[in-house]
Amino acid sequence: MTMDKDLVNEIRHARVALEEALANSGFSVSQQDLNLVYTYFFNTHPGMASENLIGKTDEDWLKDGEAAKLTKPKRRALDGKKGIREVFKSTLNGGKVGDIYYNDIRVEPIGVDGDVVGIYTVAIDITAFQKALMRLEKLNGELLEHLDYKLGIEDKKPQISKAKSNPPIKE
């Protein structure tokens, strides 16, 4: 099968435009084969490996327990032949040791002639959002405790937290 030269150039141009749009966006796109070996990986961010992942698996760059958690939805996408969406938490290696990162991942099977031949994964860095949400949930819990006391539902006045205020979220 030969492709028209103009069509090939159009496809190349579209890919370059897409990669330019994704660069530094907090979105990463990857492709893995049936053995979950990376065949394509574009645009890592601080919560992901900063090394070249082509030819590697999740076990090569994530801690054991985290690799298993990330591999599980990928296997379900391969086996179930439909997409999977999850939030994935990692304590990785791209930033400071012990930093926690959150990604909203979408895993889609790649079908060719009715057979699944691999997966695409899109990961969106939602670390700042997730940390802000956790702070809001904590604050909401404290406010509800005070509200219960004010409404007479609780007899004991809640203790006001003397902890330092939360540091700003790293962007």
Image (tube, helix red, strand yellow):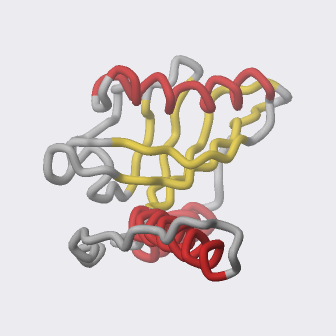
Quick check: can you spot residue 162? yes
Q: Residue furthest front?
A: 155
> From the viewer's perspective, is 64 left or right of 77?
left
Q: Residue furthest right?
A: 114
Residue 42: image quadrant is: bottom left
Front-most of 6 and 13? Answer: 13
Residue 168: image quadrant is: bottom left
Quadrant occupied by the N terminus: top right
Q: Is residue 25 above or below residue 53?
A: below
Q: Is residue 126 above or below residue 101?
A: below
Q: Residue furthest left?
A: 96
> From the viewer's perspective, is 69 left or right of 54?
right
Residue depicted at x 32% and y 31%: 62
Residue 81: image quadrant is: top right
Q: Residue furthest top?
A: 35
**Residue 51 appears at what percent x and percent y?**
21, 42
**Residue 47 appears at what percent x and percent y?**
31, 52
* Number of marks in the rendered image: 0
> From the viewer's perspective, is 98 left or right of 140?
left
Front-most of 100 and 85? Answer: 100
Residue depicted at x 31% and y 50%: 100
Quadrant occupied by the C terminus: bottom left
Q: Is residue 105 above or below residue 55?
A: below
**Residue 117 appears at what percent x and percent y?**
67, 26
Quick check: can you spot residue 170? no
Residue depicted at x 47% and y 22%: 68
Q: Is residue 77 above or below residue 17?
A: above
Front-most of 42 and 50? Answer: 50
**Residue 21 appears at what percent x and percent y?**
45, 76
